[in-house]
Amino acid sequence: MSDHTERDTTFDDANGALAIGELDEAIIGYRKCVELDPDFFDGWHALGMALLKTDQIKEAIGCGLQATTLKPNDLLAWTALSQMYVQDMQIGPAEDAKANARILSLGGKVVRES
């Protein structure tokens, strides 16, 4: 349980750094979060967005893929991944991610939950 407490405190600190424009500090915090808890969707999503803002696009895409793997029916995760692919000029994958976001925005599911 202590890992989650440390993860959550670190996540809050990283969000605080992000809020005041300290992107490098936020990225360090988000990286620590996903190191502490590799299944932490919010950490992967936030890390990917922070990396995207600092033009670390390839790593951002990896984080975006991890987020969509953890929560395949999350609209924001697919929207973010689409933006990441667009920044990397990967139009085919960007369109695929955007299509998944559209399915979810219309109330559908990308992956059926068992």
Image: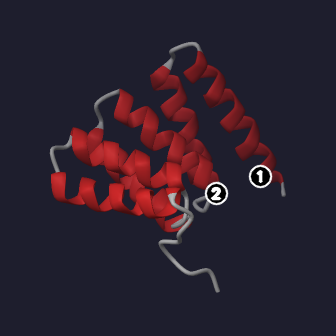
Q: Residue furthest top?
A: 20
Disc number placed over residue 63 in the picture, else none: none
Give the structural element (helix, strand or loop) at label 1.
helix
Q: Residue at x 53, y 69 (%)?
A: 108
Q: Residue at x 55, y 58 (%)?
A: 74
Closest to the observer: 59 or 102? 102
* Residues at circles 1 and 2 in contact by the CB criterion of under 8 Å: yes
Task: Tell me where residue 106 appears, x and y as whole percent.
Answer: 51, 60
Q: Residue at x 65, y 22 (%)?
A: 16
Q: Position of residue 38 (x, y in %)?
A: 58, 60
Q: Give the side of residue 72 with respect to residue 41, left or right.
A: left
For the residue carrying disc 2, how many other residues have a C-alpha within 10 Å: few (<14), some (14-19), or many (20+)?
Answer: some
Q: How many marks?
A: 2
Residue 21 position within the rendered picture, expressed as x and y whole percent measured from the top left: 51, 15
Q: Which residue is mark 1?
A: 4
Residue 98 vs 19, above or below: the answer is below
The quadrant in which residue 97 appears is: bottom left
* Residue 78 lies in quadrant: bottom left
Q: Give the mark nearest the N terminus, 1 or 2.
A: 1
- Where, quadrant-wise, is the N terminus in this rendering? bottom right
Position of residue 96 measured from the top left corner of the image (x, y, whole percent): 29, 62
Residue at x 47%, y 72% (from the top left corner): 110
Q: Amino acid at mark 1?
A: His
Q: Nearer the viewer, residue 18 or 94?
A: 94
Does 46 sit left or right of 83 as displayed? right
Q: Is residue 23 above or below residue 37?
A: above
Q: Residue furthest right?
A: 1
Per the image, the residue denoted by label 2 is 37
